[in-house]
């Protein structure tokens, strides 16, 4: 069903255009129908394509986009198993989140603008994953970045939201610059940006460990790190929570932030030629997942906890990519999209029902008051913690075991990943126990309606059973080792989350243990503050980049370079004033000066003649 | 008569004319001083022509004579205009052309 492919990104794009143009005339009912319906229709097209799919990659070229010299980039799509997984996640989870938004955003003054941006985002994201060349992929990449900026700053009347949007845009731009350089390098080397041709050419030309391959993949990795909020460019994601909660669910949990994972997986043949870069991917993933997990433990804002856990989970995906567990990473990407979208939507429901309350210390006892939300959150947290038989368990277990198998640093990676899994269970269930158990501090004044409850229930099912879904990526990635690690490794990997759950129970619900003494002690306070501030990375960047830049702007504000040109002007002015005074209009004076000049000239000539 | 004497006289006349130009304020005297300077130059031409036995000196004298006549006619016209505009012949009062 190649013919239908172009419809998939075109439907949300058309709807976004209609919504932008007709925002003045369309009523909220029409806006919701268009916004939700277009993504649903795109989802149906994806479903149809998947059902008809024979296993061979589908290709469709719409038109030649750019043709300059050697460079030829088309608006053309390439759909294989990996793309199908991404498209299903984007349109499937995207549709549920759109449906949820229809109720969540009801009554907002910019209802049509919201859906226009959200549709535009879906179109850009689909372009990103369906592109058959890196240039079109980069176009989608920048498109989702722009939509992220627009949606983080959606409530732009609050200056803090605008600042968060700018930060998200600028920080990811650092990675994008690296990625653009990587594309230039690849184009210079091979004269093409078509992904399949590029992979074939690189395999033919480069041996494993070629320095150019390492450089090119490192630059691509820079882009992936920026977009996927990994160390050292992760600081924008927690601030991006300033946007509406469904936006956080769609863009900053399920789809856009996993684009970096997709990029690395899509260009995996290049990365396989550069083992140092792959190791860097794994190490970045490991450090990010640990840093983010520790930080998530010390946050109080429900959305920020989830944001840090997203960073941590993407760290797992990077770890998996780095150790060559390609399909496990993509699998985790998919299950993460399910359970993290579920968690965000449930958190959104809590916030919605509690008058925009974000601080978990002011929540509590919501278990009986918001039963649907409680159940969703519980399932989401269980999947996030990778409790056995949930979807997160299957995918994370694959990654953790693959990390152990990695040659050389494998056991260290495994130990870090297991520690991360322990912390994940701890902070996830801290959230559940603090928000839904104990004494009620704030009472909800409404219940989530059907448009919010339906996506929650569907995502619950997927979060629980998503682990049994097979993903058709066997033909995309090289075969992975089928080695089985020792039994104790598996047992520890499975048991650790349960330990985390038990500790969370003891600390936050059973009160067997009072951790407050530990936290109140000077050392505990120091660690708490350090982790609460996200390991002070923000402060470091503030001092390293932002402050010097501001100082520079103050210095350059008076335009010192222009002073030079100003001096030339002033000199001319001075000469003009002096000379215009000599033009007195007195004839006798002119004659005298002229005579004096002639005498001087004669003297000079006389001297020169040697007199 | 040696050439040096004539050239000395011509220089003296030129210096006299120049001095008159610089010190006299009445515009008529300024014109007269100019005339003296022109004639001193013409005298130098004639003397030099006689000394070298060439007719060119006298040809240039005729030219200078013509120029002087033209200059006087224009100059007197200007004098009339200045008298009419400023009601004075003092050149220092006619400084409209200052910058």
Image (tube, rainbow, N blue to C red):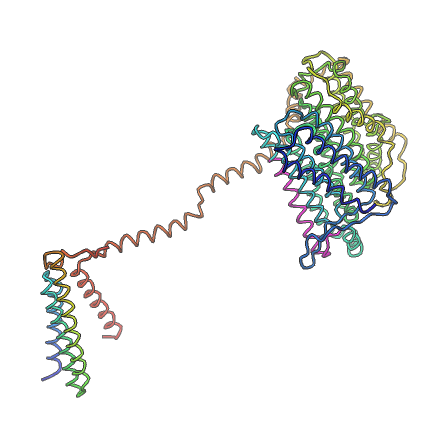
Residue A72: x percent and y percent? Answer: 71, 55
- Pick the quarter of the image with the N terminus of chain B: bottom left
Please state the extent of the stretch shown in magenta in the rendering. A166-194
Q: Quadrant of residue A407?
A: top right
Q: Identify the residue at the far bottom of this view.
A: B53
Asked if one can make out residue A332 in the rendered structure from this viewpoint, the answer is yes
Work out whether A75 lies above or below A294. below
Residue A539: x percent and y percent? Answer: 60, 31
Work out whether A113 lies above or below A368. below
- Pick the quarter of the image with the C terminus of chain B: bottom left
Work out whether A599 lies above or below A139. below
Q: Is residue A98 magenta?
A: no
Q: Is residue A186 magenta?
A: yes
Of the pair A480 and A46, the residue shown nearer to us:
A46
Of the pair B96 and A396, the residue shown nearer to us:
B96
Residue A538: x percent and y percent? Answer: 61, 32
Of the pair B9 and A56, the residue shown nearer to us:
A56
Q: Is residue B13 left or right of residue A476?
A: left
Work out whether A315 lies above or below A385. below
Residue A409: x percent and y percent? Answer: 79, 39
Q: Residue at x 9, y 57 (%)?
A: B88
Asked if one can make out residue A212 in the rendered structure from this viewpoint, the answer is no
Q: Quadrant of residue A237?
A: top right
**Numbered-mark total:** 0
**Helix, strand or loop: magenta stretch:** helix
């Amino acid at each position: 069903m190649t013919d239908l492919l172009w419809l998939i990104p075109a439907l949300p794009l058309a709807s976004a255009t209609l919504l932008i143009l007709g925002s003045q005339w369309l009523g909220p009912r029409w806006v919701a129908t268009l916004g939700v319906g277009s993504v649903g229709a795109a989802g149906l097209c994806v479903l149809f394509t998947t059902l008809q799919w024979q296993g061979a990659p589908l290709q469709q070229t719409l038109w030649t986009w750019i043709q300059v010299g050697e460079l030829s980039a088309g608006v053309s799509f390439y759909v294989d198993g990996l793309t199908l997984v991404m498209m299903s996640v984007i349109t499937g989870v995207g549709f549920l989140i759109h449906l949820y938004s229809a109720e969540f955003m009801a009554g907002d003054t910019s209802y049509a603008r919201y859906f226009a941006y959200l549709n535009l985002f879906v179109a850009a994201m689909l372009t990103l994953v369906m592109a058959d060349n890196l240039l079109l992929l980069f176009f989608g990449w920048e498109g989702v970045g722009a939509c992220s900026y627009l949606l983080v700053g959606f409530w732009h009347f609050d200056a803090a939201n605008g600042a968060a949007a700018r930060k998200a845009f600028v920080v990811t731009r650092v990675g994008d610059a690296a990625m653009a350089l990587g594309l230039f390098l690849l184009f210079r080397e091979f004269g093409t940006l078509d992904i399949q041709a590029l992979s074939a050419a690189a395999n033919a030309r480069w041996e494993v460990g070629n320095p150019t391959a390492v450089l090119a993949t490192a630059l691509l990795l820079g882009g992936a790190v920026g977009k996927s909020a990994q160390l050292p460019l992760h600081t924008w994601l927690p601030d991006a929570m300033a946007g509406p909660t469904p936006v956080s669910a769609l863009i900053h949990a399920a789809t856009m932030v996993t684009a970096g994972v997709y990029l690395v997986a899509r260009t995996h043949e290049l990365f396989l030629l550069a083992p140092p870069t792959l190791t860097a991917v794994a190490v970045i993933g490991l450090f990010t997942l640990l840093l983010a997990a520790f930080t998530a433990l010390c946050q109080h804002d429900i959305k920020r906890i989830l944001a840090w856990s997203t960073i941590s989970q993407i760290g797992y995906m990077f770890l998996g990519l780095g150790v060559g567990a390609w399909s496990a990473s993509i699998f985790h990407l998919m299950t993460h999209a399910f359970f993290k979208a579920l968690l965000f939507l449930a958190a959104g429901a809590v916030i919605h029902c509690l008058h925009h309350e974000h601080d978990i210390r002011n929540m509590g006892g919501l278990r009986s008051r918001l039963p649907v939300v409680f159940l969703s959150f519980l399932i989401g947290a269980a999947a996030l913690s990778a409790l056995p038989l949930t979807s997160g368990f299957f995918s994370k277990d694959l990654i953790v075991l693959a990390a152990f198998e990695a040659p050389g640093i494998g056991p260290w990676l495994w130990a870090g990943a297991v520690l991360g899994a322990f912390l994940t269970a701890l902070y996830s269930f801290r959230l559940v126990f603090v928000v839904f158990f104990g004494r009620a501090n704030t009472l909800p004044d409404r219940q989530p309606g059907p448009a919010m409850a339906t996506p929650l229930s569907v995502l619950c099912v997927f979060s629980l059973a998503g682990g049994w879904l097979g993903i058709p990526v066997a033909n995309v990635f090289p075969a992975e080792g089928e080695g089985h690690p020792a039994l104790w490794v598996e047992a520890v990997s499975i048991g650790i989350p349960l330990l985390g759950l038990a500790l969370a129970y003891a600390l936050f619900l059973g009160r067997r243990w009072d951790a407050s003494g530990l936290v109140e002690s000077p050392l505990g306070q120091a660690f708490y503050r350090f982790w609460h501030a996200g390991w002070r990375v923000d402060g470091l960047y503030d001092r390293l980049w932002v402050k010097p830049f501001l100082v520079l702007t103050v210095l350059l504000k008076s335009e010192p370079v222009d002073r030079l040109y100003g001096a030339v002007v002033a000199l001319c002015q001075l000469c003009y004033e002096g000379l215009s005074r000599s033009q007195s209009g007195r004839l006798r004076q002119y004659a005298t000066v002229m005579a004096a000049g002639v005498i001087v000239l004669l003297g000079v000539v006389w001297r020169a003649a040697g007199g | 008569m040696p050439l040096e004497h004539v050239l000395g006289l011509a220089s003296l006349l030129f210096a006299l004319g120049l001095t008159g130009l610089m010190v006299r304020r009445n515009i008529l005297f300024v014109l007269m001083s100019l005339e003296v300077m022109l004639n001193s130059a013409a005298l130098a031409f004639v003397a030099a022509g006689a000394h070298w036995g060439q007719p060119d000196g006298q040809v240039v004298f005729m030219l200078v004579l013509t120029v002087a006549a033209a200059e006087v006619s224009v100059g007197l016209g200007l004098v009339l205009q200045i008298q009419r505009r400023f009601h004075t012949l003092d050149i220092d009062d006619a400084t409209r052309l200052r910058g």
